Amino acid sequence: MTNLERGNGGSLAERQASLVAGLAQLRDPQARLTWAVERARQRNHLPDRLRLDEFRVTGCLVRLWLVPEFREGKCWFQTDSDAVTLRATIGLLCDLANGCEPSELAQWNPDFLERLGLLRQLAENRRATVLRVAELIRTFAKQSAPPSS
């Protein structure tokens, strides 16, 4: 449906617009979530060496990890969860955020999840977790940004 690989796809805004356009072709929000879940099932699991408490997202009823990395001036994220719906939605966030400069991510509002009805398909606690992870991505980007001159 879409190509979210950073090497093949422009800015964060361009990649998000491409994802939204592709998902909008699926009229039903449940079908959109099903697409994301199927994509998540194909995703590699986080290696055991990264399934550490320091990478666990707190406040979640299931196990969820977010592993941020800053290298060569860009932000990179890996994620995994015991809940496939979180794996799917947070995986989409990470796919979009990977390879972005901190300045791009620091101001990012992934409101497309709400506009496409993906968040409404989740239980309240899972919705809150997805929004918390979006905030963690922004916070990591702000902390990784070079100081302004």
Image: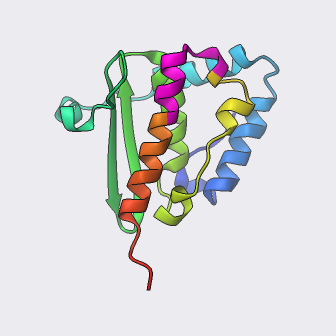
Colouring: rainbow
Helix, strand or loop for the magenta stretch, by majority: helix
Residue at (54% x, 25% y) in the render: 39
Q: Is residue 130 magenta?
A: yes
Up-down relation of residue 73 to residue 67 (above or below) = below
Q: Would residue 30 be seen by someone viewing this image from the given angle? A: yes
Quarter holding the N terminus is: top right
Task: Indicate the quadrant where residue 49 lies.
Answer: top left
Residues 71 and 5: in front is: 71
Q: Position of residue 95 (x, y in %)?
A: 51, 42
Residue at (57% x, 57% y) in the render: 107
Up-down relation of residue 75 to residue 95 (above or below) = below
Up-down relation of residue 117 to residue 83 (above or below) = below
Residue at (69% x, 14% y) in the render: 30
Up-down relation of residue 4 to residue 140 (above or below) = above
Q: Would residue 91 be seen by someone viewing this image from the given angle? A: no
Q: Is residue 146 left or right of residue 2?
A: left
Q: Specify start and end residues of the magenta stretch as a single range.
A: 120-131
Task: Indicate the quadrant where residue 104 lies.
Answer: bottom right
Task: Indicate the quadrant where residue 147 lies.
Answer: bottom left
In this rendering, the count of numbered labels is 0
Q: Position of residue 67 (x, y in %)?
A: 31, 42
Q: Position of residue 28 (x, y in %)?
A: 78, 16
Q: Is residue 79 magenta?
A: no
Which residue ends up furthest to the bottom in the rendered image? Answer: 149
Q: Position of residue 12 (x, y in %)?
A: 61, 55
Quarter holding the C terminus is: bottom left
Residue at (46% x, 27% y) in the render: 129
